């Protein structure tokens, strides 16, 4: 069974901001003028990026925010590797939160919120064991 986690980052974020964090983590990135995807180190969790030319509302269920999404990042993995992939995804969002001021929401298939970064900081709603 394949699962998808979605990181919705507020408008104003640049691909260079996301790239800086990915490079810091030594992620494998498709080499082209625009980052479109790659693999996280360790778990080899696949990720993809989508830039929204016009900002879109946050799609994570039950999340009410006053900002819109400029970049969506999806993480694709098998249920059997979820814990391993989550460790890498959490490492990414924790580093991103320290490197950049942008707000974001991380959810499992838009249905369950795992983390929120807002004005008060990063809240890991679902902690790892």
Image: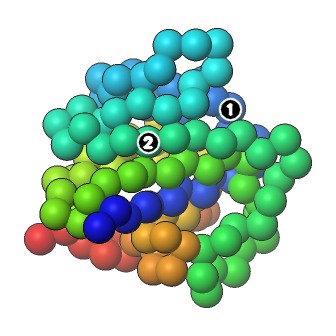
Q: Which mark is residue 70?
A: none
| Residue 110 falls in image quadrant | bottom right
Query: Which residue appears farthest toward the right when viewing the image?
Result: 54
Query: Which residue appears farthest toward the bottom when viewing the image?
Result: 62
Compared with 50, 103 (above or below) is below
Q: Earlier in the sequence, mark 2 or mark 1?
A: 1
Question: Quarter of the image containing the C terminus?
Answer: bottom left
Q: Identify the element where label 2 is drawn.
A: strand
How many C-alpha atoms fall within 10 Å of the one at disc 1: few (<14), some, or many (≥20)?
Answer: some
The count of marks equals 2
**Closer-to-camera residue (115/100):** 115
Tags 2 and 1 touching, CB below 8 Å: no
Which residue is located at x 25 percent, y 38 percent? 44
Residue 41 shows in the view: yes
**Closer-to-camera residue (13/80):** 80
**Closer-to-camera residue (128/38):** 38
Which residue is located at x 50 percent, y 13 percent? 31
User: Label 2 to label 1, Cα distance in Å?
Assistant: 17 Å
Q: Position of residue 59 (x, y in %)?
A: 67, 71
Residue 117 shows in the view: no
Q: Identify the element where label 1 is drawn.
A: loop
Compared with 14, 34 (above or below) is above
Compared with 12, 14 (above or below) is above
| Residue 118 falls in image quadrant | bottom right
> What residue is shown with label 2?
47
Which residue is located at x 19 percent, y 42 percent? 43
Decide if residue 55 is on the left or right side of residue 107. Answer: right
Q: Which mark is residue 14?
A: 1
Query: Which residue appears farthest toward the left when viewing the image?
Result: 129
Which residue is located at x 43 percent, y 61 percent? 4
């Amino acid at each position: 069974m394949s699962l998808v986690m979605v990181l919705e980052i507020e408008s104003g974020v640049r691909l260079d901001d996301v790239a800086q964090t990915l490079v810091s983590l030594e992620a494998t990135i498709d080499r082209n003028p625009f980052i479109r995807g790659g693999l996280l180190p360790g778990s080899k969790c696949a990720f993809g990026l989508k830039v929204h030319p016009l900002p879109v509302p946050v799609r994570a269920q039950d999340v009410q925010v006053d900002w819109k999404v400029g970049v969506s990042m999806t993480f694709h993995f098998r249920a059997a590797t979820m814990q391993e992939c989550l460790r890498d995804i959490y490492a990414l969002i924790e580093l991103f939160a320290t490197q950049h001021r942008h707000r974001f929401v991380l959810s499992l298939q838009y249905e369950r919120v795992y983390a929120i970064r807002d004005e008060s900081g990063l809240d890991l709603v679902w902690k790892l064991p």
